[in-house]
Image: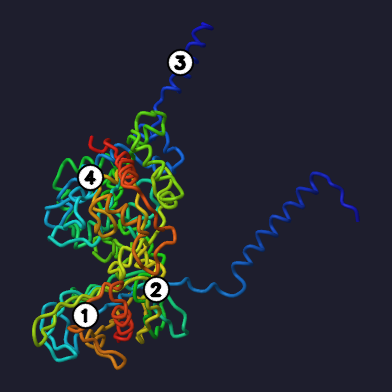
Amino acid sequence: MKWGYSLIILLLFIRCETIPNKEQDVIHIPQHFDSLNLDFLKDLTPAKIELGKRLFFDNRLSKNQNISCASCHQPQHAFADSVAVSIGTNGAQGFRNTPSIINVAFKDLFHKDGGVKTLELQVLAPIIDTNELGADFLVVLERLKQDSNYIKMFRDAFDTLPNVFGITRSIAAFERSLVMGNSAYDRYILGDSNALNSSEKNGLRLFNSQKLNCISCHSGVLFTDFSYQNIGIEHQFEDSGRARITYRPMDVGKFEVPSLRNVAITPPYMHDGSMKTLDEVVRYLEKGGGNHPNKSDLVQPFTLSSTERNDLVHFLNALTDQEFLN
Amino acid sequence: MIMKFTARNIFNFLSVLIIAVVLQSFSGCSGGDPEPDPVIKEPLNVQFKHFYNGEALEYNRIYKSPQNNDMWFTKKKYYLSNIVGVKSDGSKELISDVGLIDASQNTSTISGSIVRGNYKAIMFDLGVRQDLNAMDPATFASSHPLSVTNNMYWGWSTQYIFSKVEGYEIGQNDTASFVIHTGTQGLYRPEVSVAKQFTLGAGGTDVTINLDLYQLLKQSEYTFDLIQDGQSHTVDNKPLAIQYMDNFQNAFN
């Protein structure tokens, strides 16, 4: 009997240790991302992610039912687009280059000007923007309510019929689930010394060097400090960037520093998609960027040999993750 | 005299004390000033009617612009916040925190219940007040004025569009569309007061406020020429948006 009680207590302990951590189970967090704010995990559920994923790829969210979120945030391009500016439901062009949404869970502000305060609010923007999905939510909701699968999925995720709240929360949940950090670079810093070749290693050394000063903005595990910087892309900005939100002249031409993760597969570059290759970007920064009164002092000219330039670009290529293609 | 603390004495003392308390409570009910009547609230419907140069506003109907061109409207919607009735003594009674007025409807109404009395004005702010402007429109039911389904929200800055006016004007060479969408907190116009004498009594009442879009477009300080300058989403043409809100607040009667 004594042994019986002990066995029960032992089994309880074993049971406790094997209870899956619900938060950790929903998505995989790379071990070297642990320093980031993971509070978002507590609101993620498989039901929300599945619903958000379905909505993300559903053309019914656009006015003419001809595009979805994924039309511009394409998985094969790390959920960015391959053109300078994307085309909306009516054939109109947007006015900024589509950003990747990989690791968007770690952002505090959204859009290149930081004008949107939550990911849920950001989800609204392209859906109602006439240059993007251009949808009337009342129409979208009627479409979704005709679909028994959506009825069930909204019920499972939110215990409601399809509504705008559920659309924004579930798409945001899906986007937050896109946490990825398994590039060759990641494997290298986690101990696989063969994950990078010599050229990529030299590119990493250059990237971290004071000479290039890349890490003054492209810092940390996400390769961005999320600051707003002007690198002199234009003499007169048609898109005033951060100043669009702050109305401060000193913020004209400032845009959020993008993450460099997956940068090799997200051309073209810059807020307007005006640069087609990484080589072009590196050469632009070598000469210290362009001329604008607000240009950051952090952008200073430097010199690279052709080998060094190639090494740097090779390193940037080593930041490409393949997981999002699955 | 010394009272002994016997059981009988304690019983008598407590009995007298209870009787005194009971008598005092009765005297409290019957004496002193009478209680004021409880505040009675009555329904008030503030109806907004829309006109163009004195004629009832209809979408797609031809009117004359201030420049005497043919023009027509396809949209006019706007938000009001802090809608209050102003009593004769100057005190204010809140009718509603926020309302969305849609000129496509013959009459757009904001309703609430406020205390009976004599009133001298209806006052409101043009736009969405700051705390409401910061809210997530997806959290409101479709029937709520602040629901995103009303298509009065800017995704790019996560704020409400305070006012939309859209339409067309025929110039000498072509037909030009005009679109003026105003918003952001700097364009909030507080305490627009419209004089309205009315008494709110049993059963409630209706009050009508008129908005004449011609009076909005043509004022002594500024007259709009929508062919020359008729496009603004606020951030891309802020002077026009500011002027629109400045004129707007003076166009009610």
Q: CA distance from mark 1 to mark 2?
A: 40 Å
Instruction: List the residue tagged with mark 3.
Output: A11
Q: Tell me the quadrant of the picture where the C terminus of chain B can be found.
A: bottom left
Q: CA distance from mark 4 to mark 1?
A: 40 Å
Q: Amino acid at mark 1?
A: Gly
Q: CA distance from mark 3 to mark 1?
A: 75 Å
Badge 3 and badge 4 both on one subunit: yes
Residue A323 x %, y %: 27, 35
Of helix, strand and loop, which one carries label 2?
Answer: strand
Residue mark closest to the camera, 2 vs 4: 4
Residue mark closest to the camera, 3 vs 2: 3
Relative horizontal placement of residue A260, taking residue A92 as reference (left or right): right
Q: Name the disc covering residue A77, or none.
A: 4
Q: Name the disc covering residue B155, or none.
A: none
Q: Is residue B78 visible?
A: no
Q: Name the disc covering residue B114, or none.
A: 2
Residue mark closest to the camera, 1 vs 2: 1
Q: Are marks 2 and 4 in contact (CB under 8 Å)?
A: no
Q: Are marks 4 and 1 in contact (CB under 8 Å)?
A: no
Residue mark closest to the camera, 3 vs 4: 4
Q: Amino acid at mark 2?
A: Ile
Q: Earlier in the sequence, mark 1 or mark 2?
A: 2
Instruction: List the residue tagged with mark 1.
Output: B230
Dot 4 alpha-carbon crowd within 10 angstroms: few under 14, some 14 to 19, many 20 or more: many
Residue mark closest to the camera, 4 vs 1: 4
Q: Amino acid at mark 4?
A: His
Q: CA distance from mark 3 to mark 4?
A: 48 Å
Q: Are marks 1 and 2 in contact (CB under 8 Å)?
A: no
Residue at horizontal 31 percent and vertical 59 percent from the top: B137
Kindly identify which chain the residue marked by label 2 belongs to: B
Kindly identify which chain the residue marked by label 1 belongs to: B
